[in-house]
Structure formats: structure tokens, C-alpha cells
Image: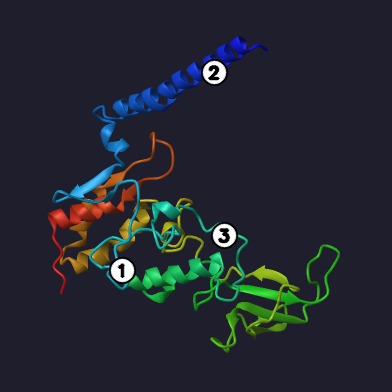
């Protein structure tokens, strides 16, 4: 290739680079930005920000905590579902715990998903002024950990232990309990777990227990969303919190329920998902109509 052709090829490549830079690097971003400023789109493009008293207090798309400086839930506010995003609802750390339904055995300093759910359920029941039995869930012990056994002994052709020789309640260490949640399993006395011991050689068995199939504490009160940023709660969880909020604000339960209804959204497109309540918008409505009088 002679020098003239070389110059022409590089000149064409340079012109193409400049044209594409203008189109994709300047014109397209400006066009998208301009479209986003149209009425009806600008609010969403800006992050669906929510203001109160002229001050931005959050986004309708991102949940947040309603706690005091020590992390204690404020009784005059509806509480959001748990969050696994950073320290809670951190958009820069959005994500799930990646713990699934088979994560039922606690590790040192790391409770299983099952134990987290059990612990939260009893805590929610207590926070809402219910008796402890209201926090009971299937596969949970009365002390709020996963009701899980390691059954040790010879196995049959299917891999199941046929004649247990030792049974351990793996999520109940002897340091915290002397009486496991179950006295015997298939005729063998159940033992509490010894700290640091490895029971993985046994067959892991979850015990359902006598808790109702439909617990009083709803699922979204004890589990985080996949993003960790869910701003909504179920109507069941909102209803569970009505009495506490009404008492803290010196209101009747009916007054609070009316605001819950006003801030409830139906199913997406009329058939997707379930009805939901935006916690931030509900709490702002409470503050606007019934300012809290604590004490």
C-alpha cells in the first residue's frame, strides 16, 4: 500500500470515529436526557424522589429504615421489611444474601437463613405487642432458631439413616440450652450441640413442629427482597403494625387503617403480584395528618 492509500484509509477511519463519537457520545445522551425531561417522565428520571417540607426525604423506589440513633425501631412509624443491602437499603450494596431454603444449619458466628427467619419472627411478634406464640413458625424452635437435627447412624440403600445411634439439635448449643426442642427422635434422646463440633456426617433433618402453616407474622416481615431495596410491604404486614402505630400516636386503629388503605397499591397491571403498601409514603401521610405525640 502506497502512502496515499494509507492516508486515505486512516482519514476515513478518523472521520468515522469522529462521527460515531458525536452520535453516540453526544447526540444520543442529549436526546435521552431531553426525553427524560418531558412531563410525566422527569420525576422518574430524577429518581422518583419524595419531598416533605421542601426537603428530599427519600425515594418511592427505595426502602429505608425508621429507627433511632441506636438502631431501635421507632414505634410511631410503620417498619419496612428486612434488608440485606449493606447496613440496610444501601443502593451501592444492593443484593440478596444468596442464602436459600436449604441453608438451615448455623455456622460459627453466622446464623442460617432459617434461624434468621425464626429470630425475626419472634422479634416482630414482640415488637407488635403480641404474645410469643404469635411469632411461631414451622421448623422453628421456641427459642428462635432452626429446628434442625443431625441424625447419626448406619444408612440404608436410599442414603437415609435407618437406625439412629445419636441425634443432635445442631442449632441449639449446650452453652445456651440444656433442654433441646425435641426430647427424642425415633427412640433416641436428642442432645444439644457442642460448640465447634462437626455434625455434617449425620443426616440433616428439619422438624416442622406444631406451628400453624399460615403464621401470624407474614413472610415479608422476616425475609429480605432480592435487591434489598424493596420500598413496599404487604397489606398483611401493614395490618399487623396498625395497633402499635395507633397507640404510639394516640389514635384509633380505624384512623390508621384508613391511611393504610389510602396508601395501598393494587396488583401491577391488575394481575401481577399482590397488593402492597409503600412504607415511606404511608409514614409521611401519618406525619402530615397525625403528627406524632410520643409519651
Residue 88 visible: yes
Q: CA distance from mark 1 to mark 2?
A: 62 Å
State the mark number for residue 144.
none
Q: CA distance from mark 3 to mark 1?
A: 25 Å
Q: Residue at x 38, y 26 (%)?
A: 26
77, 138: nearer the viewer? 77
Q: Is residue 21 left or right of residue 148?
A: left
Which residue lies under the disc numbered 1? Answer: 73
Up-down: is 94 above or below 19?
A: below
Q: Are marks 3 and 1 in contact (CB under 8 Å)?
A: no
Q: Secondary structure at mark 1?
A: loop
- Residue at far front of view: 3
Q: Is residue 291 left or right of residue 14?
A: left
Q: Nearer the viewer, mark 1 or mark 2?
A: 2
61, 259: nearer the viewer? 61
Q: Earlier in the sequence, mark 1 or mark 2?
A: 2
Q: Secondary structure at mark 2?
A: helix
Q: Residue at x 20, y 68 (%)?
A: 248
Q: Nearer the viewer, mark 2 or mark 3?
A: 2
Q: From the top left corner, tell me how far across and down residue 154 is, in percent.
A: 83, 75
- Residue at far right of view: 157
Q: Earlier in the sequence, mark 3 or mark 1?
A: 1
Which residue lies under the disc numbered 3? Answer: 99
Which residue lies under the disc numbered 2? Answer: 13
Q: From the top left corner, tell me how far across and down residue 25 is, in percent.
A: 42, 27
Residue 130 visible: no
Q: Secondary structure at mark 3?
A: loop
Q: Residue at x 21, y 64 (%)?
A: 246
Amino acid at each position: 500500500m502506497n502512502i496515499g492509500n494509507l492516508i486515505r484509509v486512516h482519514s476515513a477511519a478518523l472521520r468515522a470515529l469522529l462521527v460515531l463519537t458525536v452520535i453516540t457520545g453526544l447526540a444520543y445522551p442529549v436526546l435521552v436526557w431531553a426525553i427524560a425531561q418531558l412531563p410525566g417522565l422527569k420525576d422518574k428520571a430524577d429518581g422518583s424522589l419524595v419531598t416533605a417540607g421542601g426537603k428530599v426525604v427519600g425515594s418511592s423506589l427505595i426502602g429505608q429504615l425508621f429507627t433511632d440513633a441506636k438502631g431501635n425501631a421507632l414505634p410511631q412509624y410503620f417498619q419496612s421489611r428486612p434488608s440485606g443491602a449493606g447496613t440496610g437499603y444501601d443502593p451501592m450494596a444492593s443484593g440478596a444474601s444468596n442464602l436459600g431454603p436449604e441453608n438451615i444449619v448455623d455456622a460459627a458466628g453466622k446464623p442460617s437463613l432459617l434461624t434468621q427467619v425464626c429470630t425475626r419472627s419472634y422479634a416482630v411478634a414482640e415488637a407488635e405487642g403480641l404474645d410469643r406464640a404469635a411469632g411461631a413458625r414451622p421448623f422453628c424452635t421456641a427459642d428462635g432458631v432452626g429446628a434442625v437435627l443431625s441424625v447419626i447412624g448406619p444408612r440404608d440403600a436410599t442414603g437415609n439413616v435407618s437406625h439412629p445411634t445419636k441425634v443432635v439439635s445442631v442449632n441449639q448449643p449446650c452453652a445456651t440450652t440444656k433442654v433441646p426442642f425435641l426430647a427424642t427422635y425415633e427412640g433416641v434422646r436428642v442432645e444439644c450441640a457442642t460448640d465447634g463440633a462437626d455434625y455434617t456426617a449425620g443426616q440433616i433433618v428439619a422438624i416442622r413442629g406444631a406451628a400453624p402453616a399460615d403464621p401470624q407474622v407474614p413472610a415479608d416481615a422476616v425475609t429480605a427482597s432480592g435487591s434489598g431495596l424493596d420500598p413496599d410491604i404487604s397489606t398483611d404486614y401493614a395490618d399487623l403494625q396498625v395497633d402499635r402505630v395507633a397507640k404510639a400516636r394516640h389514635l384509633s386503629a380505624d384512623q390508621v387503617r384508613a391511611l393504610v388503605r389510602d396508601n395501598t397499591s393494587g396488583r401491577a397491571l391488575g394481575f401481577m403480584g399482590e397488593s402492597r403498601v409503600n412504607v415511606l409514603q404511608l409514614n409521611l401521610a401519618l406525619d402530615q395528618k397525625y403528627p406524632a405525640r410520643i409519651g
